[in-house]
Image: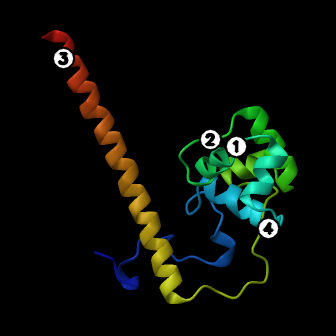
Amino acid sequence: MAESSTEREPGTDFSPEDWFSADVATLGDRIAGAREAAGLTQEDLAQRLGVRLTTVHAWEDDMAEPRGNRLSTLAGLLNVSITWLITAEGEGVTIGDAPPLSAPLRDALADLNRLRVQAAGLVQEIATVEKRLRQALRQE
């Protein structure tokens, strides 16, 4: 169930400057945003990097992460810093003079952020249960 805007936790009121922040965007989001800002398609980027299109898809969908050497090349091609890609700090893509986000967009971004936090917690919980299961199976 979505929270109403009056029930938001502090820090979930988004502005255009927040779009690529570490709290809102993932590495994949920043790669996609920088690629789009550079005017490249996923196919263009894959070709310039010498990787498969499925690799770029996986990076932008946060299913995989580029290795260090690819990350360096990627940052250079997209005209952003490696630090910005990884942490959202440093030289990167900015929204600039974009108008403020509408309430429905702010709400959707806040909900997405909340769900990411919940998903991260569930992933940690799953890992803990899997570890217990492996230990129990070894003892049998």
Q: Give the mark nearest the N terminus, 3 or 1.
A: 1
Q: Residue furthest top?
A: 139
Q: Please name the amino acid that badge 4 sits on.
A: Ala
Q: Give the mark nearest the N terminus, 4 or 1.
A: 4
Q: Are marks 1 and 2 in contact (CB under 8 Å)?
A: no
Distance from Cα at disc 4 to Cα at disc 1: 21 Å
Q: Residue at x 68, y 49 (%)?
A: 53
- Determine which of the numbered discs, if any, sits on residue 137 in the image: 3
**Would you place residue 62 above or below residue 2 in this image?**
above
Distance from Cα at disc 3 to Cα at disc 2: 32 Å
Camera-nearest label, 4 or 1 = 1
Residue at which label 1 appears? 52
Camera-nearest label, 1 or 2 = 1
User: Residue 123 in the image: x percent, y percent?
Assistant: 36, 44
Q: Are marks 4 and 3 in contact (CB under 8 Å)?
A: no
Q: Residue at x 29, y 33 (%)?
A: 128
Q: Secondary structure at mark 1?
A: loop
- Determine which of the numbered discs, if any, sits on residue 37 in the image: 4
Q: Please name the amino acid that badge 1 sits on.
A: Arg
Q: Is residue 88 left or right of residue 123?
A: right
Q: Are marks 3 and 2 in contact (CB under 8 Å)?
A: no
The quadrant the C terminus occupies is top left
Q: Give the mark nearest the N terminus, 1 or 2.
A: 1
**Would you place residue 38 above or below residue 125 in this image?**
below
Q: Secondary structure at mark 4?
A: helix
